[in-house]
Amino acid sequence: MRVIFMGTPEFSVGTLEALVAAGHEVVLAVTQPDKPKGRGKEMQFTPVKIAAEKHGIPVYQPKRIRNAECIEELKKYEADIMVVIAFGQILPKEILELTPYGCVNVHASLLPKYRGAAPIQWAVINGETVSGVTTMQMDEGLDTGDMLLKTEVALEPKETGESLHDKLAAAGAALCVETLKGLEEHTIVPEKQGDSPTAYAKMLDKKMGEIDWTQDAKAIEQLIRGLNSWPSAYTQWDGKVMKIWAADVTDTASGKAPGTVVKVTKEGFEVQTGKGSLLIQELQIPGKKRMDSASFMRGYQIAEGMMLGGAHCN
């Protein structure tokens, strides 16, 4: 098939590579504009742009895809289908209907669960044991189009947002190739979605990483894993931001206030929560790399009775 590919972050790259490897003619890659990054404000290419240029695929980076000149530009490529995966802009009806096979989206959840911008991380935060990828025929709604194919991916007990991201990126790439084959061979029967049983998987921001120690230990542990590696869960320690990268739920019952350090050993320290305690295993403080708790405690003072949290951190 002649494919226009739309995507931006690293999550999209595997699918682009898989389409090329499967013999599809990717005639254009549409991605978000380059952005300045770092202190030097050097322009940084999107991962999809880098991958497309490696394969000699033309790249188009419109600021607003719904502008009339953008739609005319896409028409020039006479594509059979558009594949959209984490592109980052909402497509107008004119683009959705531009090609014979329309627009197929690769979404990182088992729709209709976890529609929205951050389905991967929310699956971990909410303690799901199974996630997956769905391909769907896009319509004008937010992740509401008819489902084409699905594939399930099991979550490990210590799955993080980052590790699940990588699993679903690989699963999505394979499923997209399978979907295009099924559409060409007319073997796919689209399925309506119905209502979503989960809340909208809203975009992540740094504020949601601030740990509320009054929550259950299990909920906090899932938040820590879900926000690893971005934006990360954190608390206040000694007036500084302490990022928490890994923790384990324990059944220590201290009767102390949530946020209190209730146990200190060579391996780490436990913090009281609203229900149960949390053994902090890996953390990071400003100006330092990630470290295990044992390494941290060799250089810094943590004592029973110390309070974590409190003042808001940015």
Image (tube, grey):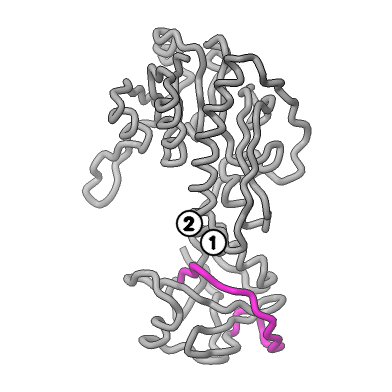
Is the Cβ of the residue at disc 2 closer than 8 Å to that at disc 1? yes
Residue located at (39% from left, 70% from top)? 290
Q: Position of residue 16 (x, y in %)?
A: 43, 30
Crowdedness of circle 1 by 10 Å Cα count: few (<14), some, many (20+)? many
Callout 2: SS? loop
Whether the magenta-drawn stretch holds residue 46 is answered as no
Residue located at (53% from left, 90% from top)? 264
Q: Position of residue 66 (x, y in %)?
A: 49, 19
Mark 1: amino acid = Gly
Crowdedness of circle 2 by 10 Å Cα count: few (<14), some, many (20+)? some
Residue located at (57% from left, 48% from top)? 120
State whether residue 165 is above or below residue 138.
below
Q: Give, as a single range, the part of the protein colored magenta.
A: 242-260
- Horizontal arrangement in the rendering, residue 287 relative to residue 296 (left or right): left
State whether residue 202 is above or below residue 269.
above
Q: Position of residue 271 (x, y in %)?
A: 59, 81
- Horizontal arrangement in the rendering, residue 192 relative to residue 7 (left or right): right
Q: Quadrant of residue 150?
A: top right
Whether the magenta-drawn stretch holds residue 257 is answered as yes
- Residue under numbered circle 2: 231
The tag on residue 209 is 1
Q: Nearer the viewer, residue 62 or 163?
A: 163
